[in-house]
Image: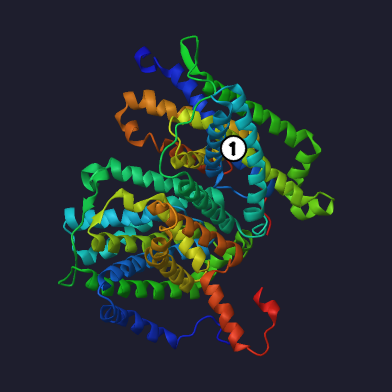
């Protein structure tokens, strides 16, 4: 549906993409510590790929997952083992690993056929614990709790060595992932997912094979997470089970929720917001506050994080993207602002 | 085979004690879920806050009384109970009222964020030092038939069963209990029948925080050191509550005890004799949970809901 209230405004997309590629140059000319900011942006880019996939699963199909850090972990470890120990090229690992992680997604998707709502959330959470423990158990391959060194990525002969190069690789893949996710959402598949979310019984009555599409949703979401995992392993150069804590899964859900459930751009915005807030704005506050209060390093961060999350859920359930949509409609209709439209 | 099972009695008894703690926490989940269909991920944190508050009262009162005695513990317990009731009202206002009509997804995230807030706030106020709580029962133990159990563990088990019986009676026999059941079935219809739904919600949250705080008070001396990691026990009580079936009070108790026994036995005897169990003994509860849910999606005692379009 193309129209006044359509949420897609295609003419801005190329400008945004150019802005993404130009921003490191701007950062470099603006600050000396641009490498640190690039590192944070890289992390946001990797998480973006994952949260877009998570949004397809949780936002569009309505299957809650509190175990996506586990998918990220499987992707990272699989790629590290494939490239460093089996000797596969990085390009091949980029294709094989997401498929393997997608199959793991099918594995957890299978019990999900019968379990729903919060039971599913807890099952996936349990899956997260189990994966973390299994990684330690297979210590011959994964290095156990000591962690694993990972080689640098080599893409078509170029070695991607520093944060500057990582940025371009990660954001190229992130843009591709976002476009793919948009295409999925706009296609028949996306509408099937939304039908399952809105009413399983009604979808079944309309002739949708629920089991098939639920599994497919887990598979696709797992593939996105596996892709993010490959990039995570080969840009971080070191992975251990501490990177894939249960709290990270919660953070991913928060990113989707803050951005706005059920919109791809929302997931992207939410990821950027949370990662930037956690790494840049809160440390700024903290320095001024520590002069007055006795604070532990992590506690204050967690406190602000929890507070923002709670306020968002209570006052802005539509998320950042919903806020943006409301603002846009508000300005378009400026002199005639029917208040009821915005509640 | 005698060597394999020499200590199994002792392990089952300690498992029941550990399981009773899970059961107490699970009871808190169950109460809230039964009446409001909200899943409270912050129950472990409520327990932790209760333990801290009780510790605060004990130190304050013992300073006033000039030493530790029975009265100090009683007074501290009363203080904690009053705190729990007030805390329940506050949580009802923060979490339950604004989110009544939101999807499950948002409510779970809201309680998780509440959990994060409570944990970090407690850590900020209490500081990074672990506290050493004192048990009101000392270090006394009871020996019966070759099995040793501490008085504290016995108190936890008895308390779990008393609370279960109390709430079971309350939900099935009293007017308010039936009102709560009606509210959980259909809040709108309940309101039309003249049930004060808001009041029902408030009472439920008060009860649940009360159970949480009491379990925190009982559990703190068992932990030897009191710090914010105590809240993670709440995460372990989740599989227990689900195993029994959310929303079933006997289910919460039985599921809790079952999980406690499984955990202790797998950590003790089974790990000792089978090497591979050693690798997985801290996630065994989750494996059991997933297997059970695949066979019975609503837990052992849960009742499947009829879905309508």
Q: Can the viewer see residue A207? A: no
- Residue B147's place in the image compared with B281, above or below, is above
Q: Quadrant of residue B309?
A: bottom right
Give x and y (percent) for residue B62: 55, 28
Q: Which of B88 and A171 is in front in this view?
A: B88
The picture quadrant where one finds residue A282 is bottom left
Q: Please give the name of the residue rendered at 22% of the width and 67% of the height, measured from the top-left corner.
A: A91
Residue in the foreground of this view, choosing between A274 and B220: B220
From the image, tell me which residue sits under label 1: B213
Lateral position of residue A78 relative to residue A279, left or right: left
Task: Where is residue A323? Give x, y as percent.
Answer: 56, 74
Picture layout, residue B90 above or below residue A199: above
**Can you say which quadrant of the picture contains the N terminus of chain B?**
top left
> Is residue B106 rendered to the left or right of residue A66?
right
Q: Check the residue under mark 1 and report the chain it is in.
A: B
Residue at image coords 66%, 73%:
A343
Q: Residue A219 at what x, y percent from top left?
A: 41, 59
Residue at disc 1, secondary structure: helix
Residue A18 x, y percent position in the rendering: 34, 84
A310 vs A227, nearest the viewer = A310
Q: Is residue A49 left or right of residue A76?
A: right
Mark 1 burial class by Cα count in 10 Å: few <14, some 14-19, many 20+:
many
| Whether residue B16 is visible | yes
The answer to whether residue A36 is left or right of residue B142 is left
- Outermost bottom residue: A335
């Amino acid at each position: 549906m193309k129209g006044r209230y359509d949420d897609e405004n295609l003419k801005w997309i190329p400008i945004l993409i150019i802005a993404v590629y130009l921003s490191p140059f701007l950062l470099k000319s603006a600050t000396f510590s641009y490498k640190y900011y690039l590192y944070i942006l890289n992390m946001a880019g990797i998480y973006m790929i994952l949260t877009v996939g998570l949004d397809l699963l949780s936002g569009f199909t309505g299957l809650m997952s509190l175990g996506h850090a586990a998918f990220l972990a499987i992707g990272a470890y699989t790629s590290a083992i494939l490239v460093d120990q089996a000797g596969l090229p990085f390009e091949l690992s980029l294709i094989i690993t997401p498929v393997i992680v997608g199959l793991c997604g099918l594995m957890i998707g299978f019990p999900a056929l019968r379990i729903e709502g919060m039971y599913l959330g807890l099952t996936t959470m349990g899956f997260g614990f189990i994966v973390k423990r299994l990684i330690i158990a297979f210590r011959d391959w994964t290095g156990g709790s000591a962690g694993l060194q990972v080689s640098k990525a080599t893409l078509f002969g170029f070695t991607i060595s520093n944060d500057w190069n990582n940025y371009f690789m990660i954001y190229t893949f992130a843009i591709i992932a976002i476009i793919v996710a948009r295409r999925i959402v706009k296609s028949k598949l996306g509408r099937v997912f939304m039908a399952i979310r809105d009413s399983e019984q009604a979808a079944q009555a309309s002739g949708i094979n629920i089991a098939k599409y639920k599994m497919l949703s887990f598979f696709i979401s797992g593939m996105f997470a596996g892709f993010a995992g490959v990039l995570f392993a080969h840009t971080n150069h070191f992975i251990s089970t501490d990177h894939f804590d249960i709290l990270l899964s919660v953070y991913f859900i928060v990113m989707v929720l803050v951005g706005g459930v059920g919109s791809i751009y929302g997931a992207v915005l939410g990821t950027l917001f949370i990662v930037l807030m956690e790494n840049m704005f809160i440390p700024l506050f903290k320095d001024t506050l520590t002069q007055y209060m006795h604070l532990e390093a992590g506690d204050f961060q967690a406190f602000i994080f929890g507070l923002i999350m709670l306020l968002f859920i209570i006052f802005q359930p539509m998320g950042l993207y919903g806020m943006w949509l409301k603002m846009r409609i508000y300005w378009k209709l400026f002199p005639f602002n029917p208040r009821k439209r915005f509640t | 085979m005698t060597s394999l099972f020499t200590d199994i009695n002792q392990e089952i008894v300690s498992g029941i004690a550990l399981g009773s703690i899970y059961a107490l926490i699970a009871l808190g989940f169950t109460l809230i879920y039964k009446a409001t269909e909200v899943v409270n991920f912050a129950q472990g944190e409520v327990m932790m806050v209760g333990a801290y508050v009780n510790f605060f009262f004990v130190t304050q009162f013992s300073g006033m009384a000039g030493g530790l005695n029975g009265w100090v513990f009683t007074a501290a317990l009363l203080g904690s109970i009053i705190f729990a009731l007030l805390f329940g009202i506050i949580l009802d206002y923060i979490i339950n009222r604004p989110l009544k009509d939101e999807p499950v997804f948002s409510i779970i995230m809201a309680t998780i964020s509440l959990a994060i807030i409570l944990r970090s706030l407690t850590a900020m106020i209490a500081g990074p030092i672990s506290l050493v709580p004192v048990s009101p029962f000392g270090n006394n133990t009871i020996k019966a038939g070759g099995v040793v159990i501490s008085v504290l563990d016995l108190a936890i088990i008895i308390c779990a069963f008393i609370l279960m019986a109390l709430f079971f009676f309350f939900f099935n026999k009293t007017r308010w209990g039936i009102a709560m059941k009606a509210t959980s079935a259909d809040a709108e219809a309940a309101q039309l029948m003249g049930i004060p739904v808001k009041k029902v919600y408030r009472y439920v949250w008060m009860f649940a925080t009360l159970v949480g705080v009491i379990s925190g008070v009982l559990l703190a001396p068992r932990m030897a050191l009191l710090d914010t990691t105590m809240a993670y026990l709440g995460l372990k009580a989740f599989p227990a509550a689900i195993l029994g079936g959310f929303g079933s009070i006997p289910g919460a108790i039985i599921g809790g005890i079952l999980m406690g026994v499984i955990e202790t036995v797998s950590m003790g005897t089974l790990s000792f004799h089978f090497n591979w169990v050693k690798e997985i003994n801290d996630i065994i509860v989750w494996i059991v949970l997933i297997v059970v849910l695949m066979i019975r999606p609503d837990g052992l005692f849960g009742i499947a809901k009829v879905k309508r379009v």
